[in-house]
């Protein structure tokens, strides 16, 4: 039997295949795999990344697979039945992130990529916060930052907030206010997230204000999950993880992750085969 871990989010999908000893035999990469944003696209990219990882090694019928997918907490119904693996388990990427970072140890993960989600593992239980998607949440994530930048630019056009070079430049780049609105009306989360580096890397006053707002949101989520008995170590994951780790450093104990969400998916696949009881995420 072979073991397949899959990590899918708003910007891409990764797969890793290993044997029973944990030796990595293949890897694959494909496009976005947020099942809440676009389930069909997510399925296609999961299959594409998996095929790359398994190529020349094994058939899907020989594979135990665990998929950690963004949006799986609300929109993964029916997906498992459409996958070709011998055994398949689909979980939110928050569970695979926790298991990748800590295995079974106590701690908090702050996953900040295209979206955002936070989770605490303590006493064998996992509690999560966030991960509700761009329309209703994902505070501090790349898409949230990109959308906030566009919203602030339009508020500056109206005179509600001071105009800055960054805000004026964004409006000009999109061909005026109407162009900003047209883009936002059809943009996927990954397209909003592509604007986030302009905030992270800028000394513009508007960029600094928006990053302070993001700091507040991220810190509040972590504080929500800290237990009364004392602070747990925090691991920052995702493309924006290092950014917020640097900005919020010193507020809580820090830990280096044992692995990322992809490693967590693979760890769960091997643990499932060893008949370990599944862990569920509570709100």
Image (cartoon, rainbow, N blue to C red):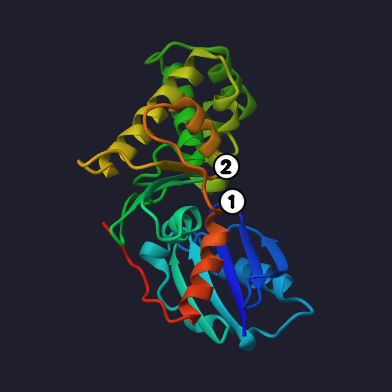
Tell whether label 2 touches label 1 (CB within 8 Å).
yes
Query: Depth check: 232 or 93 in front?
Result: 232
- Specify whether 3 is left or right of 101: right
What residue is disc 2 on? 239
Q: Which residue is mark 1?
A: 11
Mark 1 or mark 2, which is nearer to you?
2
Tell which of 44 and 73 is nearer to you.
73
Q: Is residue 78 above or below residue 7?
A: below
**Whole-percent x and y of residue 205?**
49, 13
Residue 208 drawn at (x, y percent): 48, 18
Q: Nearer the viewer, residue 110 or 182?
A: 110
* Numbered circle sitting on residue 271: none
Tell me residue 215's x, y (percent).
40, 28
The quarter in which the N terminus is drawn is bottom right
Q: From the viewer's perspective, is residue 149 above or below residue 4?
A: above
Q: Secondary structure at mark 1?
A: loop
Horizontal side of residue 71 vs 15, given as left or right: left
For image coordinates 38% across by 51% down, the residue present is 131
């Amino acid at each position: 039997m072979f073991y397949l871990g899959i990590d899918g989010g708003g910007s891409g999908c990764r797969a890793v295949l290993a044997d029973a000893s944990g030796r990595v035999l293949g890897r694959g990469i494909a496009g976005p795999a947020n099942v809440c944003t676009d389930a069909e696209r997510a399925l296609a990219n999961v299959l594409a990344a998996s095929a790359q990882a398994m190529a020349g090694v094994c058939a899907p019928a020989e594979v135990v697979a665990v998929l950690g997918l963004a949006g799986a907490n609300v929109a993964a119904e029916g997906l498992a039945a459409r996958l070709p693996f011998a055994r398949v388990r689909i979980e939110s990427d928050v569970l695979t992130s926790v298991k990748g970072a800590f295995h079974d140890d106590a701690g908090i993960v702050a996953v900040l990529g295209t979206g955002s989600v936070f989770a605490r593992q303590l006493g064998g239980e996992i509690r999560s916060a966030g991960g509700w998607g761009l329309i209703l949440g994902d505070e501090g994530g790349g898409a949230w930052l990109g959308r906030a930048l566009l919203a602030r630019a339009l508020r500056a056009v109206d005179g509600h907030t001071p105009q800055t070079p960054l805000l004026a430049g964004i409006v000009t780049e999109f061909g005026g206010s109407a162009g900003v609105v047209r883009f936002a009306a059809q943009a996927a989360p990954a397209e909003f997230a592509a604007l986030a580096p302009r905030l992270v890397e800028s000394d513009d006053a508007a960029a600094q204000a928006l990053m302070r707002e993001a700091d507040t949101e991220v810190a509040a989520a972590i504080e929500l999950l800290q237990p009364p008995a004392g602070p747990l170590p925090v691991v920052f994951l995702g493309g924006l993880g290092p950014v917020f780790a640097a900005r919020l450093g010193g507020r809580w104990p820090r830990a280096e992750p044992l692995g990322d969400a992809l490693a967590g998916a693979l760890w769960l696949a091997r643990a499932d085969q060893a008949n370990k009881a599944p862990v569920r995420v509570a709100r």
